[in-house]
Amino acid sequence: MAEKKLSELHPADGARLLESLDEGEAVKRIEAAEEEAAAKALEEMEPWESSRLLRNLSASKRADLIGLMGPDDAVDILQEFGEEVRGEILRLLEDRKRKTLSSLLEYPEDTAGGVMTPRAVALSPDMNIGEAIEELRRQREKLEDLNYAYIVDDEERLIGVLPLRNMAFREPGLTLGEIMDEDVKTVSSDLDQEELARLFEQYEFISLPVTDEDGKLLGVVTVDDVIDVLRREDTEDMFSMVGITEAREESINTPWQISLKHRLPWLFVNLGTAFLAALVVGLFQETIGQYAVLAVFMPVVAGQGGNSGSQTVAILIRALALGDLREKSNFSALLKESWLGLLHGLAIGLTVGLIVFLWKGELMMASIVTAAMICSMVAAGVAGVCIPLGLRNLGLDPALSATIWTTTVTDVFGFLFLLGLATWLLM
């Protein structure tokens, strides 16, 4: 595939090829390729990756490629540029394309307006089926959603919807107004993209029209756009949970300088939280000095608590993202995870306690480790619920740092329970 031209590859394969090359070689491939093939390959890439390659091209070449893209993909890429470069590209586009992209750029990128394409099939209710089919043929190269025709009045207000396949089974002389479905599900342009994705998942939509406050048709969101949204959201959440900032700009092919900038800040945060756990251990130096065997069990207790807490955090973040967790169920979730922590603690704690007793032959030490494990696992369950909910209530993204803070809490409490009980019962 590396030797093939972009025009010889499917756009998705062309995108993968460009992503696998270093930046300089990828830019050469784009410059040498037919513009339409290059534009389609860039459309298939993540917007930040496409913009990174386009920055290496001349202003006129950038404008030519973006002008060949679908409006929704073109806008996603334009949003990656600064205002000066974006304005330069827009000025070089033909008037109609410039006006379309400029209007789409007014919508926040994480809303239905920022995801939609204006290329919806909008037809008059007075058209008959034969006329509508002719109009579709005339516009077929420009349209992205060929599942539904949206029926609009003289003021472009959406008044009905008609599955295109239905036209093939009706008499050509019937008007669209006679056979359209007037019960149309629409979304507003400011609907959050995560809520939009939930609607598609819940009702299995193929596409959804977007309207303004007056009911005028603005565009349509298609299922492939929603798949892109879900993939980006899942990637951002997954990376955020392990402390990678600007997650959408991170991949295996990302230059090391960019990766370093994205990953290092949270590693410093993690370093600070690790010192909190070290501070707790430092309070019990005398106990550890007399009972050095405690150092063997410290990572066991803290590690199990951390793993349990991470499981709870993952469940909570998913529930928050899907809208499964309502205010009235917060307390129920806390009770459930605390109860699970207790059960997990009993199962793991008794197992570890038995191992300690068989290994060291000390019933008191085995009891201390068992009790510390139970307390640590309960604390992990509580922290795994309270920390994501607390971050959400503060207006912060729980996925961004919940795991780091939960691990800190489980480490601190794990050491505190183990060393505190040992100091109390053995010293």
Image (spheres, helix red, strand yellow):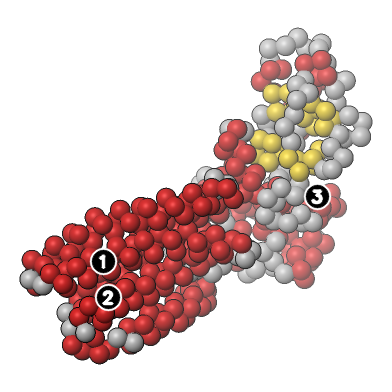
Q: In this view, does 108 lie above or below 204?
A: below
User: Number of callouts in the render?
Assistant: 3
Left or right: residue 291 versus residue 56 is: left
Q: Is residue 247 above or below residue 126?
A: below
**Pointers 1 and 2 in contact (C-beta within 8 Å):** yes
Q: Which type of secondary structure does the marked residue at label 3 adopt?
A: helix
Q: Is residue 130 above or below residue 73?
A: above
- Which residue position is annotated with label 3? 100
- Which residue position is annotated with label 1? 371
Left or right: residue 156 versus residue 323 is: right
Q: What residue type is labelled 1?
A: Ala
Give the residue displayed 59% in from the left and 50% down from the top: 327
- Label 3 crowd (10 A; few <14 / some 14-19 / many >=20): some
Q: Residue 147 carries which label?
A: none
**Pointers 1 and 3 in contact (C-beta within 8 Å):** no
Closer to us: mark 1 or mark 3?
1
Q: Is residue 427 visible?
A: yes
Sequence-wise first label, 1 or 2? 1
Give the residue displayed 35% in from the left and 52% down from the top: 340
Sequence-wise first label, 3 or 2? 3
Q: Is residue 138 visible?
A: no
Left or right: residue 36 versus residue 404 is: right
Across and down, in percent, residue 138 comes to 77, 30
- Which residue position is annotated with label 2? 421
Closer to us: mark 3 or mark 2?
2
Q: Which type of secondary structure does the marked residue at label 2 adopt?
A: helix
Give the residue displayed 66% in from the left and 20% down from the top: 165
Q: Which amino acid does label 3 sit on?
A: Thr
Q: Which amino acid does label 2 sit on?
A: Leu
- Label 2 crowd (10 A; few <14 / some 14-19 / many >=20): some
